[in-house]
Image (cartoon, rainbow, N blue to C red):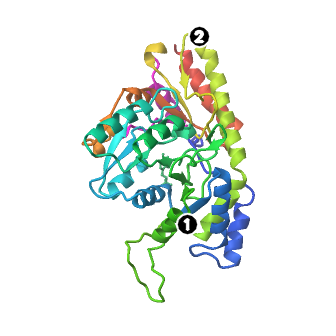
């Protein structure tokens, strides 16, 4: 029997103009770092996120690393980070030799719990050891409770690095994710809502900081005819070819958001017929004024509320059909590599990891793929 083609969790979805921009880079031999596409892409990101300055970089991870460096994070400093996230939110803290402190989530948006953040900052202040930065994340495109987080961070005068890697196009009361913190971090990795095959950006209102980011990202060369360096530099800039892909992708961002939001509505409607018949599948709901880009649609399957059905049963049945799903991010406080780190916990992210599943959410899912997914789910529900 022929293998069924794979249904991906989230695959690249190229628009009409990406190749034109890439061809332009080739025709003008503007292949090497920087160039007109990089400038135009940065301009586009500034407009999209309503921020004044953007530096296009080689990845979201490098953007986080530079943000920490620019905030003066050094060996032995502490940095607060959301526990449930992709490891790239926390790894750059370790690159600096700094110490991560992890904060659990609230139930509504699944992101950093402002109450636990306050507890952590109160204790840190008492110990005379306030963190150098706080990294909230907008998980799966759902904005964190930024108003609460900002007001607490301001009380203690600790800057925010907003990890908006999954949240380009999301907003709270029309204010874009990425524009709330001292710094915002974006990612254009292959699985994100738009992609440059690999890439990221650091955004900020602070012109001087973004200028410094560009300097550090291009090997920290002093202005001299020879190579001279007074700082340790990095090779973190985005190339002109990849920025060309990014320009084309930005043109279709609002379509991509609409498709992904449509996926969410479709899944939600599908599950509602079972939720009226003894099941209780839960979703990541938008608080009033919140707009998620619905990068990934995720469900929570608590077996005690679903006749014993588990998310693992769903995941394995999908896998047999060559349909990719994935448990929610495993919280950092549960990761072996961070096992000695301090954390402030309330049980929420443990439950999310235990019961949560990300469903195929690409903006390029076809009708045939959707039918395969839903009929696989029908077969599972029919057993209960
Ligand atoms: C993807 C991602 C990153 C890292 O971005 P890269 O461009 O892959 O380096 C950071 N944080 C979160 C939450 C992400 O999902």
The residue located at (67%, 52%) in the rendering is: 48
Q: Where is residue 126 in the image (x, y as percent from the top left)?
A: 27, 39
- Tell whether 186 sits left or right of 345: right
Please give the label number shown on residue 238: 1
Q: Where is residue 23 in the image (x, y as percent from the top left)?
A: 70, 70
Is disc 2's CB within 8 Å of ligand 1? no
Q: Is residue 18 visible?
A: yes
Q: Which of 212 and 106 is in front in this view?
A: 212
Q: Where is residue 347 in the image (x, y as percent from the top left)?
A: 37, 26
The residue located at (50%, 62%) in the rendering is: 209
**Would you call the spot at circle 1 few (<14 residues within 10 Å), some (14-19), or many (20 or more)?**
many
Q: Position of residue 14 (x, y in %)?
A: 68, 54
Measure the C-alpha gap from mark 1 to mark 2. Answer: 51 Å
Kindly state the secondary structure of the residue where label 2 is placed. loop
Q: Nearer the viewer, residue 178 or 366?
A: 178
The residue located at (38%, 32%) in the rendering is: 116
Label whose residue precedes the other's in the sequence (1 or 2): 1
Q: Which of 349 and 126 is in front in this view?
A: 126
The residue located at (34%, 47%) in the rendering is: 131
What residue is disc 2 on?
Answer: 277
Q: Is residue 101 magenta?
A: no
Q: What stretch is highlighted in magenta?
A: 309-332
How many callouts does the rendering have? 2
Please give the label number shown on residue 150: none
- Tell whether 324 sits left or right of 80: right
Identify whether 276 is placed above or below 8.
above
């Amino acid at each position: 029997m022929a293998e069924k083609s794979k249904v991906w969790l989230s695959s690249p979805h190229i628009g009409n103009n990406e190749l034109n921009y890439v061809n332009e880079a080739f025709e003008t031999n503007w292949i090497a770092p920087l160039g007109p596409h990089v400038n135009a892409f940065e301009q586009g990101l500034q407009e999209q996120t309503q921020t004044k300055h953007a530096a296009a970089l080689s990845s979201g991870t490098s953007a986080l690393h530079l943000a920490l460096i620019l905030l003066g994070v050094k060996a032995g400093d502490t940095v607060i980070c959301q526990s449930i996230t992709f490891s790239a939110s926390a790894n750059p803290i370790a690159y600096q030799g700094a110490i991560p402190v992890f904060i659990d989530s609230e139930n509504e948006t699944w992101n950093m719990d402002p109450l636990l953040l306050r507890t952590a900052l109160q204790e840190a202040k008492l110990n005379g050891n306030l963190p150098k930065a706080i990294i909230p994340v907008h998980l799966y495109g759902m904005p964190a409770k930024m108003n609460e987080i900002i007001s607490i961070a301001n009380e203690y005068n600790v800057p925010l690095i907003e990890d908006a890697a999954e949240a380009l196009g999301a907003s709270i009361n029309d204010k874009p994710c990425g524009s709330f913190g001292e710094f915002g971090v974006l990612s254009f990795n292959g699985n994100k809502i738009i992609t440059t095959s690999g890439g990221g950006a650091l955004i900020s209102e602070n012109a001087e900081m973004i200028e410094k980011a560009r300097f550090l990202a291009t090997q920290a060369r002093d202005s001299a005819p020879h190579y001279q360096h007074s700082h340790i530099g990095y090779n973190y800039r985005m190339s002109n070819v990849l920025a060309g892909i990014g320009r084309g992708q930005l043109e279709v961002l609002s379509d991509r958001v609409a498709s992904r939001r449509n996926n969410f509505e479709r899944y939600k409607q599908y599950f509602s017929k079972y939720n009226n018949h003894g099941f209780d599948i839960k979703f990541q709901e938008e608080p009033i004024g919140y707009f998620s880009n619905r990068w990934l649609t995720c469900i929570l399957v608590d077996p005690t509320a679903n006749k014993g059905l588990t998310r693992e049963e769903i995941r394995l049945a999908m896998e047999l059909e060559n349909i990719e799903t994935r448990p929610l991010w495993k919280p950092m406080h549960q990761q072996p590599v961070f096992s000695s780190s301090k954390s402030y916990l309330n049980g929420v992210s443990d439950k999310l990891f235990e019961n949560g599943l990300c469903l195929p959410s690409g903006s390029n899912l076809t009708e045939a793929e959707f039918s395969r997914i839903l009929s696989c789910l029908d077969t599972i529900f029919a057993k209960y």
